[in-house]
Amino acid sequence: MPHACHDFRVDAAGDDIPWQRIRPSESSAGDIGSAARGEPGRHAGLRSYLGFVGTFKGSLLVVVACFAVSNVALAILPVFIGRFVQSLAHATESTDGVYRYAAILIGCNILHDLTWRTGELTYLRLLNDRGYEYENILFRSVINERYPYFVGKFTGKISSYIASLGREFREILETTCFTYVEQAIRVPSIVIIMFSVNVYSGLTFLVAVLLMMAIGRHTVSRSSRAEKRLADEVSEMDGYVIDVIANFVSVKSFRQEAAEYEQVIRRRRTVIAAARSSYFWTVVFWASMSLVVRYLVWPVSILLNLHLYLTGELSLAQFTTFLSVLVMFSDFIWGTVWEIAELNLRLARVEEAYRYLFAGRPVTADRPAALAGTPPVAVPEAPGRLEFRGLSFAYPENDGRPVLAGIDLTIEPGEKIGIVGRSGSGKTTLVKLLLGYYPLPADIVRLDGRPTSNYALAAGISYVPQDTTLFHRSIRDNITYGTAAAATQEQVESAARRANTRNFRFGSGL
């Protein structure tokens, strides 16, 4: 095998030489450049998730139908309670109505329970697993991004946001089935029943609901800003702690335990301040809801309907129906407005995380978005003649200063070369380009005379970095990481011995 050392100049100057700039539209994410040039779309994270939900909307509709029937059976109970009490008042004349309405009440109760349990089991069977799949899609989309995506990003924050997005969307899916369906049925049914009792009661409850929604929206807008700040501070805090723990060797080597502890304490104070602001607006929310229900709805509606009953304008059945609805309204309307508020806060956290990870670009389940628009290029199995022609490059964050300028390089099959240059002259940058970290025009790189994408070329390159990186996995997993085919035990042990790891005890396994 011939040996040669190619010593060429890796220039950091040369402003008169054109170089390859990496523009946003040439990012690894395919269409992410279009999102980067403009403002991210509103609710991009939610739209992405709804696109994923569309892949199993049939199953979702089945589950929603079960819970809808269950809640309808519960929502109509006040009407039959009123008629049941009315029939009791005339029980001395006939008991047929008493037993009929008693049977209806019992039947509605059983129907509610049976359909609710069916909904729970159907959710477990059809939707529970799907709630976790979106997190896999998020991870795939992130891990398929090319090198520039990770430059300047906090890796701890990336992992924290992936977990946060998956958790928030699972809760949205679960809450939709178990809570939002209930609220969507019970709130309109209460208003309709109250209008059937009398117009004044209907108007009282309608105004109360609208007032609570308006007050809730106002407090939620304030709470949303506080929640966004809290979500960002918590993510920064989690990422910082992960970063410190992951680099414990450096922390120990430089005796920085106390300094890192002080940094955590300082950052925790910021988190506490954000949490205090968020909690304050939560208190304001509940206090305002209590003001409407306890000091407006109850006094006005009770005194009004009592007056109508005593003057004979309201029957006993209607008055009993009113009282049943009033108790039901007071019991769950808090939760209704709270769930709406929570949904807004949850979406605020979602958009914060999604914008950081994907800048408003849609994430789909059908293909890795990072590979969109990158056609597969076959790399020959046999070594070929590799050429760089007029290679010039500048990093995206400093595209006015070229790192490589006018590089021509030819490597023959079987040839070994050494790249020599001063520190910072671009040796590592050249390796990064060989590995496809940054995209280059196809005519810059040629394999056996054919223009080739440097991203496709990287699939045929074996790379041993100077910095040692170990996964928290078995020794065998670390040795075989990145191998195209399954390695035998003998191959693994041979590789370990060649790496001078004679102290490994192969008998106890790798």
Image (cartoon, rainbow, N blue to C red):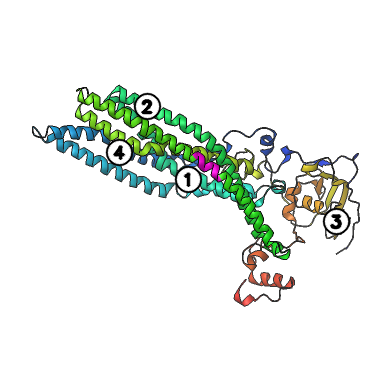
Which disc, if any, is residue 262? Answer: none
- Residue beneath label 4, please? 74
Q: Earlier in the sequence, mark 2 or mark 1?
A: 1
Residue sitting at x 61%, y 49%: 269
Q: Are marks 1 and 4 in contact (CB under 8 Å)?
A: no
Q: Are marks 4 and 2 in contact (CB under 8 Å)?
A: no
- Residue beneath label 1, please? 171
Q: Is residue 139 visible?
A: no
Q: Which residues are magenta?
A: 275-281
Magenta stretch containing residue 279, yes or no?
A: yes
Residue sitting at x 71%, y 41%: 27
Q: Is residue 485 left or right of residue 458?
A: left
Name the residue furthest left. 93
Q: Earlier in the sequence, mark 4 or mark 2?
A: 4
Q: Nearer the viewer, residue 8 or 401?
A: 401
- Residue beneath label 2, please? 206
Residue 37: x and y in percent read 70, 34
